[in-house]
Amino acid sequence: MHLFFNRLVLAAFFGLCCVFASCEKDPSFDGDHTTTPHVHTGTIEINLQAMFGDSLLTMSRGQTYLTANNDSVEVSLFRFYLSNIELTDVAGNRITIPDSYFLCDAADGETMNFTLTGIPIGDYQELKFMIGIDSTRNVSGAQTGALDPANNMFWSWNSGYIFFKLEGTSPQSQIGGNSIVYHIGGFAGANRAQRTTNIYFGNTTAQVTETHTPQILLKADAGQLFYSPHLISIANDPSETAIGQFSSQLADNYSNMISLIAVVN
């Protein structure tokens, strides 16, 4: 009887040892707490170059550019929002960058360059983003940073963000001072102006490691506003500061304004 009892005790003891041993081998178990495995991350730099067609865009007085309609344009303001950024790796996994809202201003070079952090280590083949601000943030009240209404990219009368601004002059404009003014927004309805852009890297990838930050160089073409898919005549439409069919057409045009220059690893 005692021998049988001792064997039971030994069996129970070895069983407990196996249980504890299995717990020690489980990387998701730490004492009395489960832990999330560490994800190694890195960063990506986004660099935008303001252009007008194939020419560098400058705000110098007297510097003019030709639109696709052969209208002459001098640009004094070129600003837009990029938001809701996503990356896709070579395996097809999509990484969403949280709270990614950036106000890009061609007159302020620092705003045309920004860094995406917390990117899982890997090789990425596609960048996706919205030109504009999603509907949720448009109705979320006073905000800070890039979304601060003090940045002068918010319509108080319409309670929504202006997604894109281009201002300047053109001899083809018949309004005061030959000015051109395009302020495009609208976050809901048939004429909403958010547009999503996908940038494919072709035969190269952005290679993210813990110690190396790749650069994605992009062209931001202000001239695209006048070009495609809707050819714009400044004589007919020198200004748009409301929400409607024409503003939606301008949004169609600026959906194509950002393109890839190169990926630098």
Image: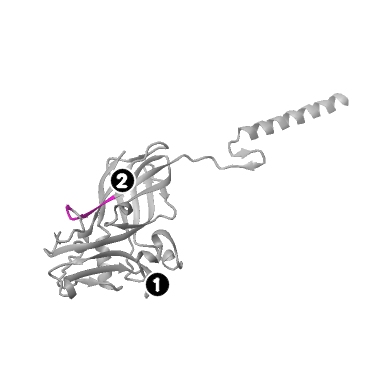
Q: Which residue is found at the position 38% from the left and 66% from the top?
A: 150
Amino acid type, mark 1? Ser
Is residue 89 highlighted in magenta? no
Q: What residue range appears in magenta?
A: 48-55
In the image as oriented, which residue stretches furthest toward the top? Answer: 3
Q: Give the percent coordinates (x, y) of residue 79.
A: 29, 61
Point 40% across, 54% down: residue: 100
Relative side of 74 to 158, left or right: left
Q: Which mark is residue 80?
A: none
Residue that mark 2 sits on: 216
Q: Residue furthest left?
A: 70
Q: Position of residue 251 (x, y in %)?
A: 27, 64
User: Considering depth in this image, is 109 or 158 the residue closer to the camera?
Assistant: 109
Q: Residue at x 38, y 73 (%)?
A: 156
Residue type, mark 2 in image: Ile
Q: How many marks?
A: 2
Q: Quadrant of the C terminus?
A: top left
Q: Which residue is mark 1?
A: 159
